[in-house]
Image (cartoon, rainbow, N blue to C red):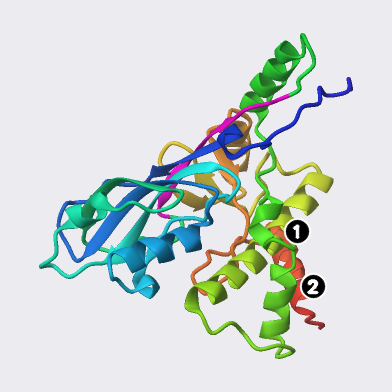
Amino acid sequence: MDALPRAVIRSEPADFVVVELPAYAPSGRGEHLYVTFRKTGRTTPDAVRDIARALDLDARSAGWAGMKDRHAVTTQTVSFLLPLGRDPAEALGLSLPGIEILEATRHDNRLKPGHLEGNRFQIRLRGLEAGAAEAVRARLEGLARTGVPNAFGPQRFGRDGDNPARALDWLAGRAPGPRDKNARRLLMSALQSWMFNRVVEARVADGTWATVLEGDVAKKHDSGGLFTVSAADLDDAVARATAGALSATGPMFGVKMRWPEGAPLALEERVLEQALGVTA
């Protein structure tokens, strides 16, 4: 394989732009205020705390669909519990460092992790060799056809990359857990993501990451619907995966997780047991 062109990314926040794609629009009524904002050089929890403080709201009531990078320009929506007698427009007048409020609308329920359609990225490559842009474009077009292993990046695991280990120490009783609810959620999310990556690595190693296996919980890309791949529909599911119409899912371990069957189940159980130090 030819050597890939080299470039520098994220030399400044504007080189990495992320826009959250909401799963639904707020209804305009309800006790939760959906605030859409653009932040630069700020973490999501820091931005949420500043907005809550400026509105005299409890940051612990806040909900968001996903964390966004600090070293970037990112747009996302966060929900706050706002008394019905207050005007949502209060948020539009806020002036906060590194935060620009774009919209504020009421909705019926709290925003929860995963309540988004996806994210759109704009990434600037600096220092790219002359003439290399075509090679980059061709590679990206190829990836658009085949996809990529959808693993979580290092920013998911904390500044020092030790959040999964801290979560395991907490679960094992070797260290106390954080007192802050959002900090606890962050640690558990990092551990879930780390175990998800272990499953992805195993599927990459055995060459099954881009297809579906019997027993996989598959996701339809058009509707988001989930189904367990049976022996009877395996051939059709493999053909649809090859065409990019669906993908195998990986584990986000928790009480509400839908478990696969067969070989995918055995792999995910093995990853979970190894992470938690469970022995037969």
Q: Secondary structure at mark 2?
A: helix
Res. 217 mark: none
The kind of secondary structure the magenta stretch mainly shows is strand
Of the two numbered discs 1 and 2 on the same chain, state the one appearing first in sequence: 1
Using residue 95 as the reference point, say whether residue 217 is left or right of it: right
Under mark 1, the amino acid is Arg
Q: Secondary structure at mark 1?
A: helix
Residue at 28% from the left image edge and 65% from the top image edge: 55
Residue 116, percent from left and from top: 42, 49
Residue identifier under label 1: 198
Depth check: 51 or 134 in front? 51
Q: Is residue 112 visible?
A: no
Res. 274 mark: 2
Using residue 3 as the reference point, say whether residue 264 is left or right of it: left
Depth check: 193 or 183 in front? 183
Quarter of image, res 100: top left
Q: Callout 1: few (<14), some (14-19), or many (20+) C-alpha neighbours within 10 Å?
A: some
Query: Is the residue 236 above or below the residue 266 in the image?
Result: above
Residue at 54% from the left image edge and 39% from the top image edge: 246
Residue bounds of the magenta highlight: 115-126
Depth check: 113 or 179 in front? 179
Query: Is the residue 8 above or below the residue 103 in the image?
Result: above
Residue 72, percent from left and from top: 57, 43
